[in-house]
Amino acid sequence: MRVRLRDLAEGLGLSVMAVSKALRDAPDIGVATKARVLAEAAKRGYWPNEAARSLRVKQSGLVGLLLPDLTSEEGAMVSGSLAEAAQEAGIALLVGVARSGKEEAEQVRAMMGRGAEAIFFLPRISTEHRSAVLEVVGRAGLPLIFFKRYPADVDGGKGKVSWVVRDMGGAANLVLDHLHDLGHRKVAYLGGHPAARSSAEHLRGMEEGVAARGMVILGGVQMVGLEAEGGEAEMKKMLGKKERPTAVVCVNDAIAAGASRALLAAGVSVGGEVSVTGVGDGALACYGPVPMTTVCFPSLGRVGFSLWQKVREGKGEMKPEIVKGELVVRESSGKA
Amino acid sequence: MRVRLRDLAEGLGLSVMAVSKALRDAPDIGVATKARVLAEAAKRGYWPNEAARSLRVKQSGLVGLLLPDLTSEEGAMVSGSLAEAAQEAGIALLVGVARSGKEEAEQVRAMMGRGAEAIFFLPRISTEHRSAVLEVVGRAGLPLIFFKRYPADVDGGKGKVSWVVRDMGGAANLVLDHLHDLGHRKVAYLGGHPAARSSAEHLRGMEEGVAARGMVILGGVQMVGLEAEGGEAEMKKMLGKKERPTAVVCVNDAIAAGASRALLAAGVSVGGEVSVTGVGDGALACYGPVPMTTVCFPSLGRVGFSLWQKVREGKGEMKPEIVKGELVVRESSGKA
DNA sequence: CTGTTAGCGCGTTCAA
DNA sequence: TTGAACGCGCTAACAG
């Protein structure tokens, strides 16, 4: 069924080595033989057995990506950009989903077993302190690149651990600048759980930015979930209070979409009476309840991949990357 | 660095085979030895080399998924559900993105080289007739499972080619039933390019369903792209015409979201003056411009995976699956 | 330029 | 119950 080097060699009356060299375009092989071999290989539909190859050369050309969910926009964006970058570099991508620490450890072990040369990891949103992945991968001495969320108790770049995260503090300030210009002073905040380092960064950016501009945070909520449902529920509660903010700053687009939906349902015009902002610039920002003012970031997957690629080629350390965002103004924000 | 069977064997004063058997829980190994081996393996952090293993046993426990884009909701849904199903079965998943026939062929060859036991394929939306993937995979005699779109000139189930598609004709009828009950008679249609078999099925369902219920299609558009932008643009054009439909049936949620946005921008209430429906029940259906009446389908990835799994275990053929949808009524549809 | 030898880490086979 | 020999498909290092 499957054609091997030996089959080609026998068919051509050559040695296995000659065929191997011809196919790999080695320097010490005759042009004539090479042509014959290539023709035969094409005719018989040969393709190399990478398992055998990587067993021999101890390089698999394979990396693993571990994430909690591929269907979420977050997961889709990271995996999509990483897959593109890997494909362009001729590196294959193994994808695993894991919803618990136990599954994470299993999946990572499976990836290492298959020869993954690096592990890319988008952690779950969780308050767990130690990550099983960090332990398993660290012990094996494999490069480990975190996306978006990262452990507080590790210093990146030094060893084989690094991360690519968004500059959430900067994102908060971009939004606050914009809202301040529009005349907003009293804002509400819908954030993530501060145990997650990037949520904490966003919160810090908010607190510092608000103080620096003479603004105040009227209602501040830290949610564990980061979905639209949560934003909708929290916004509903907030509408019951007597003092109302003129703007609602959210830590992501989904929460902002949920909050917008709640406001619209209560007959409040979004972008008119109350402004709402998100972070991410995904599908919900463009085609959500209201075209949304948000902060757009470059694809983290690409950045992470080139981080590793440099190390693989022996050029430099894996310095963590804090990616800067850009403000995108749409209709969900307006004058106070 | 990496621990091999031999390292464990030497450390324990056993043969490689004894260790191998102990780790695989073979019947002919002593309980005491097994315990010793397991302890040592755990202590030294052993994990098997799958490349070597699959070279020997000629089974990789690996499948490949090829798609045009992981970041689209379509790609994210298929890959997410396939990844979950594979993970539960202990099968690893190789993911490749490809935007052209040439890239598709390359990626598929790479997957086969790595020992993929089956190829799952979500084709691009295209009007090309012959797929390079079909050719390459078919020649290798590997199982090939299409998602959503499939070749017109192949009969599935017979050989190693099959597919999992949504019952788009049925989806059209679910929606038409609902709209007819609400009193709608004149509907507009925003569909996909009929070269894609599933778009053609939806169109056929529409035409037959409309005729059977004494309804008419006022404006019918087949778009090549299936994104929100297209729906928005087409809806704008439609608003310029003199005769207006009371409902707009769209072939997916993104187009419906775009159409809704155009209607709202023109001051037309969606679900009040004009009803809009989609297909898919994704994020845009729940948190789009208007909570959307749509058709929800089970995850195709899971269905496709179990299709292959049966064959792998030697139980039955790969019969193509036409998955039925369910109507989800939300606010975007109302009385005519 | 071409071929030979050896072995990557594992599992099948069969003998001890 | 355990172990020795052998080979999966490929390539590094050397010899011819």
Image: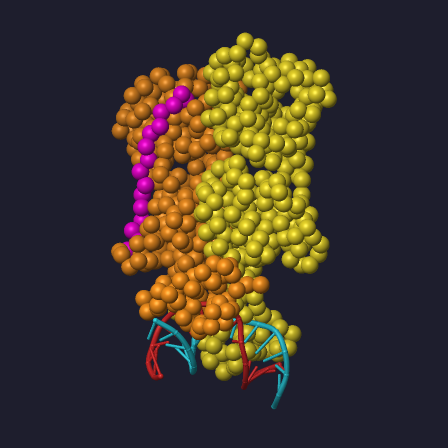
Chain colours: A yellow, B orange, C red, D cyan
| Residue at the spot 49% in from the left edge and 67% down from the top edge | B8
Q: In the shown orientation, is residue A306 left or right of residue B210? A: right
Q: Nearer the viewer, residue A330 or A11?
A: A330
As drawn, the residue found furthest toward the top would be A242
Q: Quadrant of the C terminus of chain B?
A: top left
| Residue at the spot 30% in from the left edge and 58% down from the top edge | B313
Q: In the shown orientation, is residue A172 left or right of residue B118? A: right
Disc tally is 0
The spot of residue B70 in percent (x, y) is 50, 44
The spot of residue B303 in percent (x, y) is 34, 46
Query: Magenta region's main secondary structure?
Result: loop
Q: Nearer the viewer, residue B24 or B201?
A: B24
Q: Which residues are magenta?
A: B317-332
The spot of residue A250 in percent (x, y) is 58, 25
Above or below for A314 versus A104 = below
| Residue at the spot 31% in from the left edge and 43% down from the top edge | B322
Is residue B323 located in the magenta-colored stretch of the structure? yes
Q: Nearer the viewer, residue A193 or B70?
A: A193
Q: Quadrant of the N terminus of chain B?
A: bottom right
Residue A158 visible at all? yes
| Residue at the spot 45% in from the left edge and 43% down from the top edge | A100
> What is the quadrant of residue A184 in the picture?
top right
Q: Nearer the viewer, residue B27 or B99?
A: B27
Q: In the shown orientation, is residue B103 left or right of residue B191? A: right
As drawn, the residue found furthest toward the right would be A212
Residue A327 visible at all? no
Is residue B29 located in the magenta-colored stretch of the structure? no
The spot of residue B23 in percent (x, y) is 41, 63
